[in-house]
C-alpha cells in the first residue's frame, strides 16, 4: 500500500547448488568469474571528447612554443643573418621552378627592404620604390654605387611585379645574387 515505504518488485530466485555429501568437511572452492559491464555510450563519448581536446591543446601548445622559440631566435639574429635566413627559406620554396616568378620577386624585394629597415631604420617596406630610393639617396650611409645597384634591382623587380615581365633564369639568379650580396 501507499502508506508504507516499500514497493512491490519482481521476485528473485536464488538457486543453491546441491551439497555433495563427499565434500561436506572440505573447503568448497567456488570460482567466480567477473563479468565486464560496458560503460554507457555517453560516458565513453565524454571521455573521448576530453581526450581529443587534451591532444588538440597539447598540439597547439607545442606549435605555439615552436613559434615563440623561432621568433626569439629571429630577434637575436643580426639584420644580415636574418635576411640571409629569410633568403634561404625563399630559395627552399623553389617558387621559380613552380612558375611563380612574381611571388618570388615580391618576397625577394621584401627581404631586401626588411633588411634595410632593420639595419638602417629606413621604413623601406611601406614605401614605393621611388620614395625609398629618394630616402636612401639623402642618407649618407649609402654610397652612390649601392644606390645604383638598389635602383637597378628594385626597378627590375617592379617590372616583374607590376608589368607582367617574365625574366630569364640568368636575370633571376642575378637578382638573387644582388640581394644576397647586399
Image: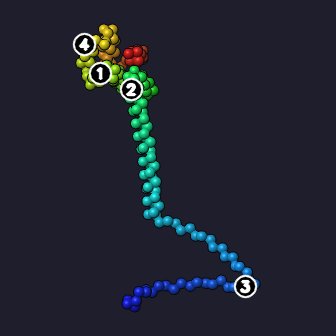
Q: Which element is circle 1 on? A: loop
x then y, percent, for residue 29? 69, 76
First-in-chain label (4 vs 2): 2
The residue labelled by disc 4 is 138
Q: Which element is circle 2 on? A: loop
Please give the name of the residue rendered at 38% of the width and 29% of the height, measured from the top-left corner. Answer: 75
The answer to which quarter of the image holds residue 28 is: bottom right
Contact check, label 3 and label 1, Cβ < 8 Å: no
CA gap, disc 4 to disc 3?
Answer: 114 Å
x then y, percent, for residue 152? 32, 13
Residue 121, disc: 1
136 with respect to 167 (left or right): left
Picture layout, residue 70 above or below residue 42: above
CA gap, disc 1 to disc 2?
Answer: 30 Å
First-in-chain label (2 vs 3): 3
Please give the name of the residue rendered at 25% of the width and 21% of the height, measured from the top-left corner. Answer: 128
Q: Along the line of sight, which residue is nearer the eye, 126 or 66? A: 66
CA gap, disc 4 to disc 2?
Answer: 35 Å
x then y, percent, for residue 49? 43, 56
The residue labelled by disc 3 is 24
First-in-chain label (4 vs 3): 3
Neighbourhood count class around disc 2 (C-alpha, 10 Å): few under 14, some 14–19, many 20 upward: few
Q: Of the residues tagged 2 and 3, which is closer to the observer?
A: 3
Neighbourhood count class around disc 3 (C-alpha, 10 Å): few under 14, some 14–19, many 20 upward: few
Please give the name of the residue rendered at 73% of the width and 86% of the height, measured from the top-left corner. Answer: 21
First-in-chain label (3 vs 1): 3
Residue 100, disc: 2
CA gap, disc 2 to disc 3?
Answer: 93 Å
Amino acid at each position: 500500500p501507499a502508506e508504507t515505504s516499500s514497493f512491490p518488485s519482481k521476485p528473485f530466485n536464488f538457486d543453491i547448488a546441491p551439497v555433495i555429501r563427499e565434500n561436506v568437511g572440505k573447503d568448497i572452492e567456488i570460482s567466480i568469474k567477473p563479468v565486464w559491464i560496458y560503460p554507457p555510450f555517453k560516458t565513453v563519448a565524454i571521455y573521448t571528447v576530453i581526450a581529443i581536446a587534451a591532444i588538440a591543446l597539447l598540439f597547439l601548445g607545442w606549435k605555439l612554443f615552436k613559434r615563440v622559440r623561432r621568433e626569439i631566435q629571429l630577434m637575436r639574429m643580426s639584420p644580415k643573418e636574418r635576411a640571409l635566413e629569410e633568403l634561404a627559406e625563399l630559395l627552399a620554396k623553389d617558387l621559380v621552378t613552380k612558375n611563380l616568378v612574381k611571388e618570388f620577386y615580391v618576397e625577394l624585394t621584401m627581404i631586401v627592404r626588411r633588411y634595410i629597415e632593420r639595419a638602417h631604420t629606413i621604413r623601406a617596406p611601406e614605401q614605393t620604390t621611388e620614395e625609398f630610393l629618394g630616402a636612401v639617396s639623402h642618407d649618407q650611409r649609402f654610397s652612390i654605387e649601392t644606390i645604383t645597384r638598389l635602383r637597378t634591382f628594385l626597378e627590375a623587380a617592379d617590372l616583374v611585379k607590376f608589368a607582367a615581365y617574365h625574366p630569364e633564369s640568368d636575370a633571376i639568379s642575378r637578382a638573387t645574387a644582388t640581394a644576397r650580396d647586399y
